[in-house]
Image: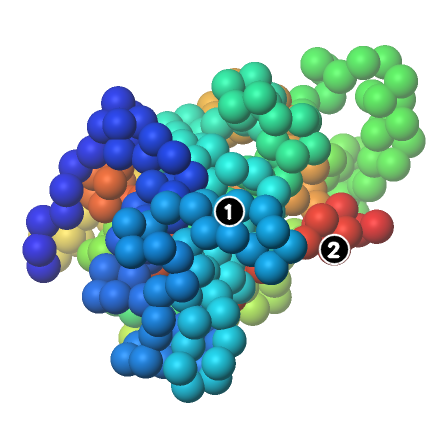
Amino acid sequence: MARTEQISVMQLVDRIRTTSDAYAYMEQLRWPNGPVCPHCHETARLYFLNPANGTSRKTRTGSMSQRRVWKCGACRKQFSVTTGTVFHGSKIDLRKWLFVIFEMCASKNGVSAREVERKYDLTPKSAWFMTQRIREAMKAGPLAEMMTGVVIADETYIGGRLPEMNKKRRKALNAQQPMVPGSRTAGPGWNKTSVLSLIDQDTGEVRSRVVPDVTGATLRKAIGEQCDLATTTLYTDEHKGYKTLAPELAGHESVNHKDEQYARYRNGEVITTNAAEGYFSQLKRSLDGTHHHVSVRHLPRYLAEFDFRYSTRKLDDSARMRRLMGQVGDRRLTYRPLTGR
């Protein structure tokens, strides 16, 4: 694999001084082997409609535009590098898109919409919508391969702590508090959102999902959608929910955190869930310190963002940005479905 060019923020500023430069640079990132028609996937008969130097062209309404436009000789349709992507139809300058993408790829703790609003002179809605569209592109594709081999599984709870909530919110939650049969208290995380994460020990890839609960049936379904159970050895903690799918697995090993056992050895292999604990530590610190509040409705996209950065943590910022550009196609996200309006 060829080594990608490492680029800094200042180099990025020098490279994309105009909107036309931004289109050319995005073409280089998304189409390293030349342009591809997003309508019919033609690669040969494509014609550049801008002037030869790539500067502004006159549109059919008579206005001047720096958008770099191509025409396909097969389907006869026009397109640009943003057609059919998460950038499709955006009125925001493409330079701002590239700078925000670079920040979100390079910032370990993430970037909040309020930061984007202040830095790039956007409205709050535009900044929030932009970051959500980028997170949509960070999601793993539907054709991602099933996990095999050793997979570390662990669950956590995302949400506020009752003692730190205001009195009105705390009172409302206490009124909804469910009771565990045979007990006078609620189960762990009853007022929070459950998240399950799976980490491939060989590749370091992580996949996180919001789950309704952490019962055995729910965990069986969630893990079965991501792992080939017959060829997967699962490393977990002592949670009883994982035992329901143990007979279907190639192997199941666990550590007992209640007895302060965080790693043990068997046949020369280290059995531990510390990778998942480290991932959750970074995730929770960032949600609390950078974003402060994340609704349950949009939590899957935030998980996709942290999954993407964790899975590509061994790449440099430029390679991570190039990887993201390879995922922006066929990921359109419009405002109304996003907000449920």
Q: Residue 340 placed where, x, y %?
A: 79, 51
Give SS at disc 2: helix
Mark 1: few/some/many CA within 10 Å (<14, 14-19, 20+): some
Question: Which part of the image, by quadrant, shows the N terminus?
Answer: bottom left
Mark 2: few/some/many CA within 10 Å (<14, 14-19, 20+): few
At x 30%, y 46%, the residue is 25
Q: Amino acid at mark 1?
A: Ser
Q: Residue 332 placed where, x, y %?
A: 58, 59
- The residue lying furthest to the bottom in this view is 74
Left-right relation of 86 to 12: right
Disc 2 + disc 1, Cβ < 8 Å: no
Residue for badge 2: 337
Is residue 209 something that shows in the picture?
A: no
At x 89%, y 18%, the residue is 168
Residue 267, labelled with which disc? none
Q: Residue 237 placed where, x, y %?
A: 41, 46
Is residue 19 something that shows in the picture?
A: yes
Identify whether 215 is placed above or below 284: below
Q: Amino acid at mark 2?
A: Pro
Identify whether 28 is placed above or below 287: below
- The residue lying furthest to the front in this view is 62
**Picture colour scheme:** rainbow
At x 38%, y 35%, the residue is 18
Of the residues under marks 2 and 1, which one precedes in the sequence?
1
Q: Quadrant of residue 257?
A: top left
Q: Nearer the viewer, mark 2 or mark 1?
A: 1
Left-right relation of 229 to 267: right
Left-right relation of 15 to 208: left
Q: Residue 132 placed where, x, y %?
A: 58, 43
At x 48%, y 84%, the residue is 75
Q: Quadrant of residue 227?
A: bottom left
Residue for badge 1: 65
